[in-house]
Image (cartoon, grey):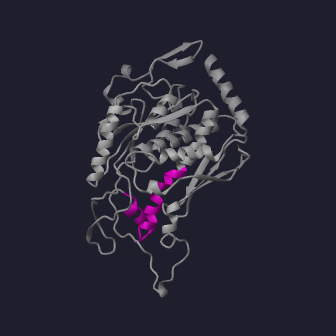
Amino acid sequence: MRYLTAGESHGPQLTTIIEGLPAGMPLTAEDVNKELSRRQKGHGRGRRMQIEKDQAQIKSGIRHGYTLGSPVALVVENDDWKHWTKIMGSEPFDETEGEEVKRQITRPRPGHADLNGGLKYGHRDMRNVLERSSARETTVRVAAGAVAKQLLKLLGIEIASHVVEIGGIKAEQAEFESLAQLQELSENSPVRCLDSKAEKKMMQAIDDAKANGDSIGGIVEVIAEGMPAGVGSYVHWDRKLDAKVAAAVMSINAFKGVEIGIGFEAAERFGSEVHDEIAWNESKGYYRKTNRLGGFEGGMTTGMPIVVRGVMKPIPTLYKPLESVDIDTKEPFTASIERSDSCAVPAAAVVAEAVVAWELASAIMDQFYSDRMDALSASVEEFRRYAKEF
């Protein structure tokens, strides 16, 4: 299972094409749109989220609410495109008639892809870089993740996310009875935080950063329950599922670190305080008494909840911009300002949830018979029975 995305931040639309879904899987635009709506929420979002009302249009691969087994194409139109038709249009402009490309960027912004992308592809106008490197692209990654979440749900696998830290303010570890409850609590918080006291402090920190023309980052956590044990592989490095999950989280714009389970804390503990003891009973089969390794051992799932955290740096677009150098004049300037958020950590939690869901669903599809949804469900259930009785 794979997907591609296409589109620029201020282009006419964003597109994703998903290939490899089983035939007969129920899927509607509403399944996707509810996830797109979640991505647009969160205290600290900028004006772009007030302009765009992200709605996915299904262009292929689904008939009468069910997948066909052929590629699924999803499109999200950019409402802001109407203000950028000449600036971002695909047709050539005529220099002889005095036309020029407006809003050219020759001053790369620190922390962005601008300068490196310009060097790589030879773009003297770095708008050619920033339009694609923009986090706007995560819109259709969330759309692809929504499809993956639907597949996982049909197999009894649930996934949720929340924010555990913003701007150095850490949430107390919250108690929740189920992932459904965690998701409900997270959805009801403006910063997707389960700790109401920390929530207020986080919101104030975001407001303070915005007032100062600055930005702040944080840490998000994704939890998945119901994955069968033994998904992934220890045989080759590129088939280890925890590695694929970590890579997916690191691929999100502005993410600079990933940990699974207790993660970096393991460096400070003895082995007896890190590894999870194995137990067995008739109702559960094999399980771990603890889950410090976050649901993975040897590149494979253990059947325990998968716990992944990602670190998002502060957004580098600042309203008190850092110094840069104009690539045409080589003179120092303060960097160009593009419309941006002061904090996108709450939205990034939804993106992280989406990319983790995709990797888990993809691994399931790789390991089990997957041409038909009914056969896939039966194959996964048969494996669960086998693992329990092993």
By secondary structure, the bulk of the magenta-drawn segment is best described as: helix
Q: Residue 19: tell me if it is visible.
A: yes
Looking at this rendering, what residue extends furthest in the top direction? 282
Is 189 drawn above or below residue 383 in the view shown?
below
Query: Which quadrant is the C terminus positioned in?
Result: top right
Residue 309 is left or right of residue 58, and the answer is left
Residue 114 part of the magenta-drawn span: yes
What percent of the width, then of the height, locates residue 106? Answer: 36, 70
Name the residue nearer the viewer: 322 or 367.
Answer: 322
Q: Quadrant of the rendered structure where residue 23 is?
A: top right
The vertical placement of 318 against 93, above or below, is above
Give percent across and percent down for residue 342.
Answer: 34, 51
Residue 105 position, x and y percent, is 38, 69
Instruction: Count the numbered circles shown.
Output: 0
Residue 48 image position (x, y, % from top left): 44, 57
**Residue 324 figure quarter:** bottom left
| Residue at the spot 60% in from the left edge and 35% down from the top edge | 152
Q: Work out whether residue 162 or residue 42 is closer to the camera in this orientation and state it.
A: 42
Q: Quadrant of the N terminus?
A: top right
189 magenta-colored = no
Compared across the picture, whether 228 is left or right of 84 comes to right
| Residue 135 visible in the shown view | no
Instruction: Give the residues drawn in magenta, as a range.
Output: 112-140
Q: Nearer the viewer, residue 51 or 130?
A: 51
